[in-house]
């Protein structure tokens, strides 16, 4: 590990470090792992672990984020009281001290310092390597993560089902109160109760919740979007709803579990879409229809309810680092984009699909640079203010479309995502045929395309389309299609044979590209 130059003072750790993407692990769960042989010999029994870190520095304070189980053999331990004080100041959760070969036993002065300053101290036996402890913590975190994801996924499904009921807002509030084990209240900007569900609060915490709701009510510029507080053992939170009506979702629960904030975020998006008290019956029906469409109805069945609302954009998304998406991360993505209409798929590398109602999805400006390749285009000003790249995600979006054409938009979004992955662009938008191609009557263009491409199978046509959009780049086409580059070469060679065409000829490529864009 690098050390700071002599005579300099390293910066202190951040006061509010970013949390890991997993729930914290209770220290008691780690101690229950009999194969590790850990024994708590000082300090409190309760602690929550966010990380595991090993250090033999005399003062590891500058390199701690807070919440660590710090593992050390005490190589440079000279002043236990100062050492423990710095760990407590840095926010370390616990100290694991390995005996032998440096110390035969845990120093008594270290035990006394941990007891005095309230830092849990664990004795690590000689036969337990530090890496085994780290592996056990990551395993426990993975298990907690899976439990959290299952809970959030179930909550998301329950909330979406509630939103499809004839009385969506009370149903969503009731389901939210059930999921969080507390009370959920929808308030106006003036603090008037519109709907409520769950057990009633005593007067004092109810008053504290109302005051917290006024903090986020959008009556003045600069109001925060959310706020949290506590009244005794009751956890309070308030969220401003979108739509410009000043509605606030206020929550109170006796416990706080990992995933509660994500569940609340899903409800916020749903209630912002529904906003029944200020939306009118027709608009509430349209929002419920969108959710029903997500749950399996066809566009034709819900189109009468949607009326002229729209246009809509279909978005396909995958994690940039290649990790599979899940209900939690997909729900968070939907909340960031301003929609609760999210299909996380069934795993196995499937893309997350989102249906975005453009009129209510402003999330910040999008850089107006045309991505590489003919399948994409820069966004117009109006669309650029609706969709923004999302950190950690690669997005492919369709152009705005009416609800009756969402099946075609879904194909455009899938194509755009493949192009974005191949070009390493955070966001690509695929548009219908425009420009000079729009001068040809659609029926004639489609007939020409069918005749020209008739020899090709669907996989060959898809490969040819992707390869042309990426200017004949074998590697990027392989990445976009998820196949080996030699497979791409074989398919393109087969296309040339079946079409009896020289695919290196620019005129041939242009005509094929025009034909492929009709599909």
Image (spheres, grey):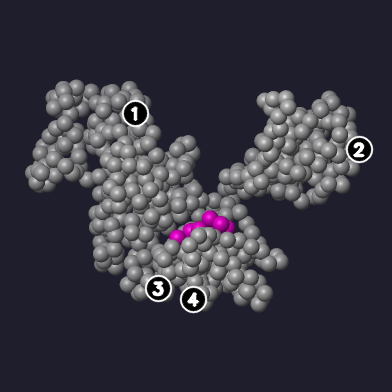
Q: Identify residue for label 3.
A: 278
- The quarter of the rendered structure image containing the N terminus is top right
In the rendered view, would you say 72 is above or below 298? above
Measured from the top left, where is residue 505 in percent x and y?
16, 23
In this view, the residue farthest toward the front is 7
> Can residue 513 be seen at all in this image of the molecule?
yes
Mark 2 or 1, nearer chain start: 2
| Crowd class of label 4 (few under 14; some 14 to 19; many from 20; radius 10 Å) | some
In this view, the residue farthest toward the right is 108
Q: Please name the residue shown 40% across and 73% down the image.
A: 278
> Can residue 415 be seen at all in this image of the molecule?
no
| Crowd class of label 2 (few under 14; some 14 to 19; many from 20; radius 10 Å) | few
**Residues shaded magenta:** 260-269
Marks 1 and 3: which is nearer the front? 3
Q: Identify residue for label 4.
A: 194
Q: Identify residue for label 1.
A: 476
Q: Identify residue for label 2.
A: 108
Which residue is at the front of the view, 499 or 193? Answer: 193
Give the quarter of the image for residue 11. Answer: top right
Q: Distance of mark 1 from mark 3, alpha carbons? A: 49 Å
Q: Please name the residue shown 73% across and 27% down the image.
A: 7
Give the quarter of the image for residue 215. Answer: bottom right
| Crowd class of label 3 (few under 14; some 14 to 19; many from 20; radius 10 Å) | few
Mark 1 or 4, nearer chain start: 4
Label ID, residue 367: none
Q: Please name the residue shown 76% across and 51% down the image.
A: 46
Say if mark 3 contacts mark 2, CB within 8 Å.
no
């Amino acid at each position: 590990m690098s050390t700071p130059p002599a005579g300099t003072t390293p910066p202190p750790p951040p006061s509010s470090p970013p949390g890991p993407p997993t729930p914290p692990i209770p220290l008691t769960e780690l101690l229950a792992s009999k194969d590790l042989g850990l024994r708590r010999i000082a300090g409190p029994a309760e602690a929550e672990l966010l990380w595991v870190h090993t250090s033999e520095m005399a003062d590891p304070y500058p390199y701690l984020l807070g919440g660590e189980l710090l593992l050390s053999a005490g190589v440079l331990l000279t002043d236990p009281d100062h050492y423990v004080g710095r760990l407590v100041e840095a926010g370390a959760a616990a100290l694991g001290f390995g005996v032998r070969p440096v110390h035969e036993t845990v120093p008594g002065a270290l035990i006394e310092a941990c007891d005095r300053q309230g830092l849990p101290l664990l004795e690590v036996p000689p036969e337990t390597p530090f890496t085994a402890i780290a592996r056990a913590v990551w395993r426990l975190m993975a298990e907690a993560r899976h439990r959290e994801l299952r809970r959030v996924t179930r909550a998301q499904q329950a909330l979406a089902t509630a939103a499809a009921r004839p009385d969506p807002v009370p149903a969503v509030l009731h389901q939210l109160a059930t999921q969080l084990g507390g009370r959920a209240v929808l308030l106006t900007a003036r603090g008037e109760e519109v709907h409520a569900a769950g057990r009633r609060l005593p007067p004092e915490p109810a008053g504290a919740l109302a005051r917290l709701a006024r903090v986020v009510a959008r009556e003045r510029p600069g109001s925060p979007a959310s706020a949290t507080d506590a009244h005794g053992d009751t956890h309070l939170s308030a969220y401003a709803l979108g739509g410009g009506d000043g509605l606030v979702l206020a929550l109170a629960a006796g416990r706080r579990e990992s995933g509660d904030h994500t569940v609340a975020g899903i409800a916020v998006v749903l209630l912002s879409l529904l906003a029944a008290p200020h939306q009118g019956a027709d608009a509430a029906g349209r929002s419920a229809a969108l959710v029903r469409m997500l749950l399996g109805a066809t566009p034709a069945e819900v189109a009468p309810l949607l009326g002229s609302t729209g246009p809509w954009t279909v978005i396909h998304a995958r994690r940039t680092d290649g990790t599979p998406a899940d209900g939690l991360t997909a729900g968070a993505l939907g909340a960031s984009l301003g929609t609760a209409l999210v299909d996380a798929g069934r795993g196995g590398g499937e893309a997350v699909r989102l249906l975005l109602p453009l009129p209510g999805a402003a999330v910040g400006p999008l850089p107006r640079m045309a991505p590489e390749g003919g399948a994409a285009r820069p966004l117009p000003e109006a669309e650029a203010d609706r969709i923004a790249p999302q950190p950690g995600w690669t997005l492919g979006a369709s152009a705005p479309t009416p609800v009756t054409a969402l099946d075609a938009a879904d194909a455009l979004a899938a194509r755009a995502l493949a192009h974005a992955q191949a070009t390493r662009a955070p966001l690509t938008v695929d548009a219908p045929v425009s420009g000079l191609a729009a001068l040809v009557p659609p029926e004639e263009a489609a007939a020409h395309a069918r005749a020209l491409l008739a020899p090709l199978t669907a996989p060959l046509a898809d490969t040819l389309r992707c390869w042309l959009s990426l200017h004949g780049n074998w590697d990027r086409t392989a990445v976009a299609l998820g196949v080996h580059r030699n497979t791409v070469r074989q398919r393109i060679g087969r296309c040339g044979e079946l079409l009896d065409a020289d695919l290196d000829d620019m005129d041939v490529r242009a005509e094929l590209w025009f034909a492929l864009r009709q599909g």
